[in-house]
């Protein structure tokens, strides 16, 4: 099944829109490529919700979600000053936030409830950040420590926010 959104994220675009530029990686006949940051895996979708408990109950009751973790804004500062629930639904995670880490850090204006971003795991976030910055991509939030993770955010040409995350303690 062809999914143009996945193609778009995986391959990049030959366009410049505002200050965000994506370059198409060089793809060889054998399917290998050079010039694109390579995520290790798709990790999660993040949603901004008004009532975390109500939404967590919905996902547990209707999608057999397992509650993996709760975060409390009072125990954090800056980007980590968020309330959230991490759920496992099927083989992926769904994060329910009261506000996005980049909102809490004052790096974006308030975002309405709904889709916040999706996240890819990378082996080395600093290397990925360097490669994407060299390709002309501006970051919403530079690599920052978030508990056991190191995270960074940028947007694609359509404005869809993407998180890169590195597990710091494997």
Image (spheres, rainbow, N blue to C red):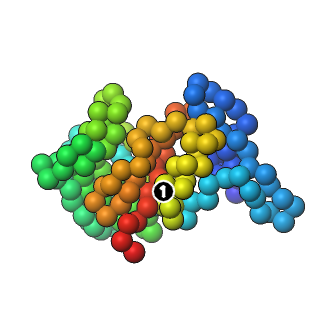
Can you name the residue that lies furthest to the right here?
A: 29
Name the residue rendered at 44%, 57% in the picture: 165
User: Quarter of the image holding residue 40?
Assistant: bottom right
Q: Is residue 122 above or below residue 11?
A: below
Residue in the picture at 57% in, 60% down: 39
| Label 1 CA crowd tier, 10 Å (few <14, some 14–19, many 20+) | many
Looking at the rendering, which quadrant does residue 15 occupy?
top right
Q: Mark 1 highlights which residue? A: 125
Q: Is residue 147 among what the camera can see?
A: yes
The answer to which quarter of the image holds residue 100 is top left
Dot 1: element? helix
Image quarter where the C terminus lies is: bottom left
Does 150 appear above or below 15? below
Q: Residue 10: x and y, percent?
A: 65, 52
Q: Where residue 159 sits: x, y (%)?
A: 52, 33
Left or right, 122 with respect to 69, comes to right
Q: Between 150 and 47, which is closer to the camera in this rendering?
A: 150
Name the residue located 21 percent from the left edge and 59 percent from the top edge: 70
Can you say which quadrant of the picture contains the N terminus?
bottom right
156 on left or right of 32? left
Q: Which residue: 87% across, 61% down?
A: 29
Rendered location of residue 31, percent (x, y): 80, 63
Give x and y (percent) for residue 37: 62, 54
- Horizontal side, residue 122 vs residue 48: left or right: right
């Amino acid at each position: 099944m062809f999914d143009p959104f996945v193609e778009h994220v995986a391959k990049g675009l030959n366009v410049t829109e505002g200050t965000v530029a994506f370059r198409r990686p060089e793809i060889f006949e054998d399917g290998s490529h050079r010039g694109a940051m390579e995520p290790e895996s798709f990790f999660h979708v993040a949603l901004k919700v008004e009532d975390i408990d109500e939404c967590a109950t919905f996902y547990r009751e209707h999608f057999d979600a397992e509650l993996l973790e709760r975060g409390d804004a009072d125990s954090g500062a800056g980007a980590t000053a968020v309330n959230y629930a991490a759920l496992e639904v099927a083989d992926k995670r769904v994060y329910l936030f009261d506000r996005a880490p980049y909102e809490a850090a004052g790096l974006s204006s308030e975002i309405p409830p709904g889709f916040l971003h999706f996240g890819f795991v990378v082996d080395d976030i600093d290397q990925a950040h360097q490669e994407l910055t060299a390709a002309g991509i501006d970051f919403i939030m530079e690599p920052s420590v978030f508990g056991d993770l190191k995270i960074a955010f940028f947007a694609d040409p359509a404005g869809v926010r993407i998180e890169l995350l590195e597990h710091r303690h494997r």
